[in-house]
Image (cartoon, rainbow, N blue to C red):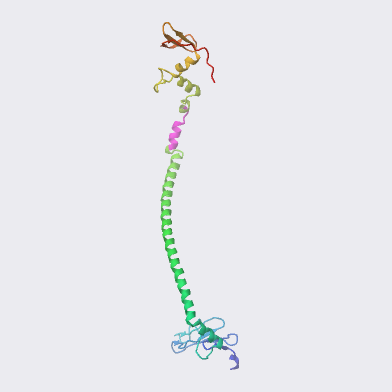
Amino acid sequence: MYTVWGAVDGIDTGNYRNNTSVFSIYFDETAGFVKQTDSARWFRDDDTRPARDPTTGGSGIEINWRNPVYAYDGGGGGFTGSDRAVLNAAATQSSLNTVDTVVDSIKVDTAAILVDTTAIEADTTSLLSSVSSISGDTTAILADTNELQADWADGGRLDLILDAKSTQVSVDAIPSAVEVSDALLVRSLATGVNGGRTVQDALRGLRNKVSIDAEAGTITVFAEDDATPAWTGTIATGSRDAINTVDPA
């Protein structure tokens, strides 16, 4: 018997600890399921279940070993006077009112959390909708990009068009700067055709020879050789002072 002395400590009236370093105790059954009928706790200091698994009889044992038991009585028992004073103070109406106030605060905070959760759910739904829309646009962009890549690839639709337009013949057909300038000079001032009242004729009166026959009432503007008439017109004269000089500002 001395070998198990100190193997069990009664911590209080509701909790009993098996000190396994002194003697290791496991409960067992051999004749059917055994159920603990009181509320005390029996536990091992190594926190393992204090019953064989499986039991010898195979029916098993139900024992309270995990949850600590808090015993209380009104007049003595396992609690000290200070223990009873603490519990009695906690059981006053004032203490209960304090607990009730705390619970009410928790309810308010919980309601606020629920409101925030609802708003988050709405924002999440909106975000998912936006992501879905962006995903659709991205799919369309990828489709267009893939189409362009195919068109610009060697032998693609746009590549063939570019190849056809970039032949030496088409390059040779591009007019030079001199050709563009010459074409501009013979362009009509009135319509988009050549001939008629051209840009060249408009400029000739500023630089080439100009002959005015006051008696005949005519004006002749010559070509660049100052001998060949380029164009002629009629003039009308009036009584006014002659212009002697023009001095630009």
* Residue sitting farthest toward the top: 215
User: Residue, x 48% and y 25% (percent of image)?
Assistant: 172
* Badge count: 0
User: What is the chief secondary structure element of the magenta stretch?
Assistant: helix
Q: Is residue 29 magenta?
A: no
Between 1 and 113, the residue placed more toward the observer is 113
Q: Position of residue 210 (x, y in %)?
A: 47, 11
Specify the quadrant that holds the C terminus: top right
Specify the quadrant that holds the N terminus: bottom right
Q: Position of residue 19 (x, y in %)?
A: 58, 86
Q: Position of residue 197 (x, y in %)?
A: 41, 17
The stretch in magenta equals 158-168
User: Residue, x 45% and y 69% (percent of image)?
Assistant: 108
* Residue sitting farthest toward the bottom: 1
Between 99 and 94, the residue placed more toward the observer is 94
Tell me, yes or no, if residue 80 can be seen here.
no
User: Residue, x 47% and y 23% (percent of image)?
Assistant: 180
Q: Is residue 164 magenta?
A: yes
Q: Position of residue 75 (x, y in %)?
A: 51, 91
Query: Against 71, is 208 above or below?
Result: above
* Residue sitting farthest toward the front: 240
